[in-house]
Image (cartoon, rainbow, N blue to C red):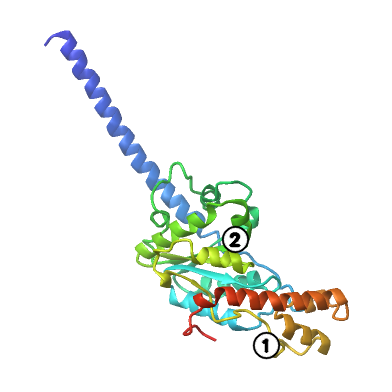
Amino acid sequence: MPEFLYNGALQSLKLMTQGMLNYLWNQVYTFIRRRLIAIRIFSLGVPYEKGIWKGHMDTLYENSATKALRVLFSSRRPGATVYWGLESLGKSYMISKLSKEYSTANGYRFIYIDCTEFNSMDFKSFLYNKIGMDRQSDQGPFSSYLPNDTGYFITVVLNRFDVAMMKSDAACAVVSEMTRDSIRTSCVFNLLIVVNSPTNALSLLTIAKNLPRQHIKLLGPAFCGRWGAEELPISAKTCDMLLVNQCGTLMPLICDAANDPLIQLRASQQQLEWEHGERMLEAYRESDEIV
């Protein structure tokens, strides 16, 4: 065989061998990464949070939001659920408490992401880094990196998502992408997105107009999570409870200053915020949701 043909064949063999080795290495690397990601996910549960009402920091009182969350977690419904409610409802505390109940149950896990830690323009990279993934290396669907061979169902909690929406226009697009992935993967995971602003809730509900409406919806009935004096123990002053009935939040009990004109003004403002928000979102409420 002429030397130039021999050298060409040898070079081709080297390139072929190198390609095969690179392919095998990538397969092994991907397998190891996915196993490590699965292990990390089991450590990303919802952290412990104290209640915001002094003297009742470890007691979970039931209202329409706790009932709706129990329905959501029990249903293992694919897609995304938007939990909108004013500040001072104790949304994070409710999720923290209830997640412990469901995490101890067989086959349920949570991935908790606090969006107040987001400080870049690339929300997807932030999300992936939290989970131990790399946006450049992990190009497949999000669901393909979840431990779906264990039988676990996972809820991804994006808490305080208003912050992400304020800092990145692409944050909603990531939610849309993950919602579609959830629908396609035979209910391996779903999303729970928590916001304080009804405007942000509306943006999330309309991010993908061709996405089936049943796969991205609001949590619970109208005024979901709104507090009334009948749902709380009679351990506060009567004037405090009157303000709770007015504003529907725990703000008067947290501030403990019912006679302060500023607190009374804030209660009136929250009452208007509730009504404005529910009018804005009325078309997205479902009549068959739990009351």
Residue type pointed to by label 1: Glu
Residue type pointed to by label 2: Phe
**Residue drawn at x 60%, y 66% as measured from the top left:** 199
Locate residue 145, reporting x and y percent: 41, 54
Which image quarter holds the N terminus?
Answer: top left
Assign a secondary structure to mark 2. helix
* Drawn side of residue 26 relative to residue 283, left or right: left
The residue closer to the viewer here, 177 or 7, is: 177
In front of the other: label 2 or label 1?
2
* Drawn side of residue 53 relative to residue 45, left or right: right
Could you tell me if residue 237 is visible in this image?
Answer: no
Dot 2 and dot 1 residues touching (CB under 8 Å): no
Query: In the image, is residue 58 above or below residue 138?
Result: below
Locate residue 104, reporting x and y percent: 52, 72
- What's the mark number on residue 231? 1
The residue closer to the viewer here, 68 or 3, is: 68
Query: In the image, is residue 118 above or below residue 51?
Result: above
Tell me how far mark 2 sits from mark 1, CA to CA.
27 Å
* Drawn side of residue 231 relative to residue 186, left or right: right
- What's the mark number on residue 161? 2
Single out the residue that lies furthest toward the left. Answer: 1
**Residue drawn at x 62%, y 64% as measured from the top left:** 47
Locate residue 105, reporting x and y percent: 49, 74
**Residue drawn at x 84%, y 77% as measured from the top left:** 256
**Residue drawn at x 54%, y 54% as measured from the top left:** 171
Which image quarter holds the C terminus?
Answer: bottom right
The residue closer to the viewer here, 95 or 169, is: 169
The residue closer to the viewer here, 20 or 173, is: 173
